[in-house]
Amino acid sequence: QLQLVESGGGLVQPGGSLRLSCSASGFAEGYVIGWFRQPPVRRREGVSCISSTGRSTWYAESLKGRFTISRDNAKKTVHLQMNNLKPEDTGVFYCAAVRRKYRSSMCFWTTSFDSWGQGTQVTVSS
């Protein structure tokens, strides 16, 4: 398992942007990275996912066009660029990792991943 640390959360006004980062210790090739969001009093939900090479990505349907995931394996970091943020995007964002072959169907489920960060709070409010 990897040690994952998220950063970049904060308070932003509606329409604003944030860039989340997920840094991993012991980062190695072959890890799929996912971002999940947990709104208040709701279950954790898949936001985005990227294959180990970065060539394949997945986004929750409602977020397409606003969020972009990318990775820099040399820097052992995965980013989630979030634009045009809305109040309903508020929640704790977690990054997760698993060393397995990428399939888009895995990105929606928390049970697909076995390493998790501690989360970073994102609050979208005026």
Image (cartoon, helix red, strand yellow):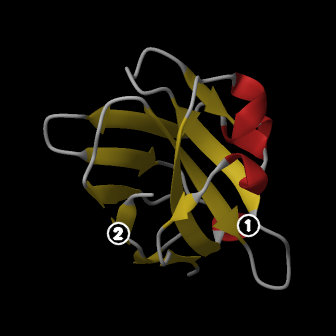
In front: mark 2 or mark 1? 2
- Quick one: 33 or 120, which is closer to the camera? 33
Q: Quadrant of the C terminus?
A: bottom right
For label 1, the SS is: helix
Residue at the spot 49% in from the left edge and 26% down from the top edge? 51
Quarter of the image for residue 63 reads top right
The answer to whether 54 appears left or right of 101 in the picture is left
The answer to whether 105 appears left or right of 54 in the picture is right
Looking at the picture, how far across and down is residue 47, in whole percent? 65, 48
**Amino acid type of the residue that numbered disc 2 sits on in the rendered structure:** Val
Residue at the spot 58% in from the left edge and 23% down from the top edge? 101
- Quick one: 35 or 63, which is closer to the camera? 35
The single residue placed furthest to the left in the displayed view is: 74
Q: Is residue 52 above or below residue 84?
A: above
| Crowding at mark 1 (Cα within 10 Å: few <14, some 14-19, many 20+) | few
Residue at the spot 22% in from the left edge and 45% down from the top edge? 76
Looking at the picture, how far across and down is residue 6, in whole percent? 38, 68
**Amino acid type of the residue that numbered disc 1 sits on in the rendered structure:** Glu
Residue at the spot 64% in from the left edge and 73% down from the top edge? 90
For label 2, the SS is: strand
**Residue denoted by label 1:** 88
- Quick one: 122 or 46, which is closer to the camera? 46
**Residue denoted by label 2:** 5
